Image (cartoon, rainbow, N blue to C red):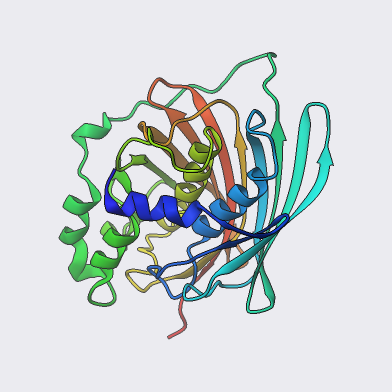
Amino acid sequence: MNDALESLLDLLTLEQIEEDIYRGQSRPAVVPRVFGGQVAAQALVAAGRTVPAERPPHSLHAYFLRPGDPGAPIVYTVDRIRDGRSFTTRRVVAVQHGQQIFHLTASFQAHEEGLEHQEPMPRVPDPLTLPTAAEMLPRYADRFVAEGVAERLLEARAAVDLRYVDAPPFATAGEVREPRSQVWFRTQGKLDGDTGIPRPLLDICLVTYVSDMTLLDSVLLAHGRGGWAVGDVVGASLDHAMWFHRPVRADEWLLYDQESPTAQGGRGLAKGRIFTAEGQLAVSVIQEGVIRTPRA
């Protein structure tokens, strides 16, 4: 486990300040706002702290309401909506500077046996044959809109080994491609020690954190846009939904297959499927985000 992963785990270890009220810290982000994956993962940790460990999350639905301040803590208030025989429902409101910045509703379920089927995993190269972020990002530093962007991207992703199957949008700006992006990812180190967060909640929260990193890439590819780093779009997450179908380990390789069915009205929609290395469909994701082109 590297220092960046330890720092991320510290970020997810919330301080309880009152019953069902938690406080999470933030850290500098690549853009001057709290990274959406961070606030979603922290909110899910807060919800999970009020649910028995044997009931992991099976879905979440969230709205990003305001940009978060990375220089200030975030207070998470959990509403215990329902505790049923099989399902538990929680609502979380995140507040900064007296304003709500994020809402999340999560549902938890005790394990059950039932019908099973899934879509097949796409054929992709082995992750160990692909370049790491540290190897790839410096190659494109001259394309970024400002100096230091490659370094900030590396720092923001240092806790996660993320490897693109094909070139990312910032590497092919100006080239219209199929609206599909694929990445392999896993944490930079094993999660075998005592982190203070029970598994599988920890794995699910870490996957939630990573799920917001690249999901809108497929929208950009359809229009030959390189993203905020290249300076040809302004974007932000609006809402985010996830369904956790099967157990998942964040410290083992996971394939994130992402595509965009549509973009209009200054917004883009992206869908994702997360597979285990063995081919099991573990997570489904849908997100809509603001995708605007800067005015001249």
Q: From the viewer's perspective, is residue 44 above or below residue 56?
A: below
- Say whether residue 132 is left or right of residue 12: left
Q: From this viewpoint, is residue 208 visible? A: yes
Q: In which quarter of the image is residue 116?
A: top right
Q: From this viewpoint, is residue 217 visible? A: no
Residue drawn at 35 percent across, 32 percent down: 253
- Rendering coords of residue 239 (x, y %): 63, 57
- Say whether residue 80 is left or right of residue 134: right
- Rendering coords of residue 287 (x, y %): 58, 52
Q: From the viewer's perspective, is residue 233 above or below residue 47?
A: below
- Rendering coords of residue 281 (x, y %): 51, 26
- Say whether residue 26 is left or right of residue 243: left
Residue drawn at 43 percent across, 21 percent down: 279
- Count of numbered circles in the view: 0
- Rendering coords of residue 192 (x, y %): 38, 32
Residue drawn at 36 percent across, 74 percent down: 231
Residue drawn at 62 percent across, 37 percent down: 243
Q: From the viewer's perspective, is residue 38 above or below residue 44?
A: below
Q: From the viewer's perspective, is residue 105 above or below residue 201?
A: below
Look at the image and tell me in which quarter the N terminus lies.
top left
Look at the image and tell me in which quarter the C terminus lies.
bottom left
- Say whether residue 264 is left or right of residue 148: right
Q: Nearer the viewer, residue 11 or 273?
A: 11
Q: In which quarter of the image is residue 183?
A: top left
Residue furthest bottom as drawn = 296
Q: Quadrant of residue 21?
A: bottom right
